[in-house]
Image: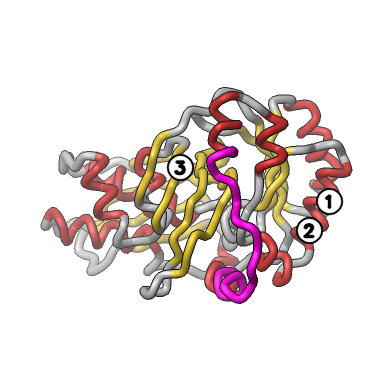
């Protein structure tokens, strides 16, 4: 078969609240998740007479060549639909890891969708979402890949409409954040809960002032303790006049939103010599 190529988008969290810890080790969350244009590219090809699906990446610093989330995605789909096909999945990796951008989860979700199409399995989005819950907490979001309010461990998704056309500047320090470590430290730190209702209202009404005043990430304090450069980046962006600034996910990426591309482009030029930066936009 010919190569099957698919984009694998990153995401940002425009607001994240941790509502409670669970006995199973996970946390109940309330957050807004939106896809952005910035993406990896997956190149998928069936391989014959091989025992496993293999994943390779052109970012060799990752040192992951087989059992990552994309390989697990094929295994879970095969368990459900009973096929034996194996694949080589080449990931042109642009989304940094330990960044809060959901790159690995996106790769897994898009592998599910791609193999479903390649084999004409006919699985619906809802069926793929059920399978994706077994792979990782963020994976279900990337099946539909549209702005949502997520609750629970990320499996309860409610579509939201974003009125403004936002550009996004993402800035990541060299050091990443371990999701496990951030949640562990956050559990021992009491802080104010995030007003997700106001964030959703601001996004749907196009109220940038309300968004700037409401935007927050419950995990940010813990992440900053582990990677102090997160606070440095936030301060620099705000000093340049950007008002809608926050950390995404469990870090370490910070993002700024604006409908004015020029002001984000100007900020990007200042940050690029020191950090990983990308100017992109929200997908609606």
Mark 2 lies on a secondary structure that is helix
- Is label 2 in contact with label 1 (beta carbons under 8 Å)? yes
Q: Nearer the viewer, residue 260 or 84?
A: 260
Residue occupying the point 26% across, 56% down: 47
Residue occupying the point 42% across, 51% down: 151
Side (left or right) of 129 relative to 231: left
Q: How far across and how far down the image is residue 73, in percent?
A: 31, 58
Q: Which mark is residue 235?
A: 1
Instruction: Compare marks 3 and 1 and give the one earlier in the sequence.
Output: 3
Label 3 crowd (10 A; few <14 / some 14-19 / many >=20): many
Q: Which mark is residue 149?
A: 3
Circle 2 is placed at which residue position?
A: 231
- Asked whether the viewer can see residue 240, the reply is yes
Residue occupying the point 46% across, 52% down: 91
Figure quadrant of residue 224: bottom right
Q: Nearer the viewer, residue 166 or 39?
A: 166
Q: Which mark is residue 212?
A: none
Q: Nearer the viewer, residue 6 or 170?
A: 170
Side (left or right) of 1 relative to 269: left
């Amino acid at each position: 078969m010919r190569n099957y190529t698919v984009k694998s988008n990153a995401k940002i969290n425009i607001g994240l609240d941790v509502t409670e810890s669970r006995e199973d080790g996970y946390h109940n969350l309330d957050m807004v998740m939106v896809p952005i244009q910035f993406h990896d590219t997956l190149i998928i090809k069936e391989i014959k007479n091989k025992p496993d699906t293999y994943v390779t990446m052109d970012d060799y610093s990752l040192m992951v060549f087989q059992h990552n989330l994309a390989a697990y995605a094929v295994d879970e789909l095969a368990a459900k639909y009973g096929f034996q096909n194996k694949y080589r999945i080449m990931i042109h990796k642009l989304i940094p890891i330990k960044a809060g951008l959901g790159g690995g989860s996106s790769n897994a979700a898009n592998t599910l969708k791609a193999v479903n199409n390649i084999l004409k399995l006919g699985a619906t989005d809802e069926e793929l979402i059920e399978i994706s819950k077994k792979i990782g907490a963020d994976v279900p979001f990337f099946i539909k890949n549209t702005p949502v309010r997520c609750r629970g461990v990320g499996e309860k998704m409610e579509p939201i409409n974003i009125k403004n056309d936002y550009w996004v500047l993402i800035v990541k320090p060299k050091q990443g954040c371990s999701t496990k470590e951030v949640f562990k430290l956050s559990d021992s730190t009491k802080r104010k809960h995030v007003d997700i209702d106001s964030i959703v209202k601001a996004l749907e009404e196009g109220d940038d002032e309300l968004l700037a005043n409401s935007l927050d990430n419950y995990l940010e304090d813990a992440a900053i303790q582990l990677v102090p450069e997160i606070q440095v980046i936030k301060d620099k962006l705000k000093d340049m006049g950007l008002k809608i600034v926050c950390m995404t996910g469990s870090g370490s990426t910070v993002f700024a939103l604006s409908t004015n591309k020029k002001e984000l482009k100007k900020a990007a030029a200042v940050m690029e010599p020191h950090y990983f930066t990308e100017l992109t936009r929200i997908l609606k």
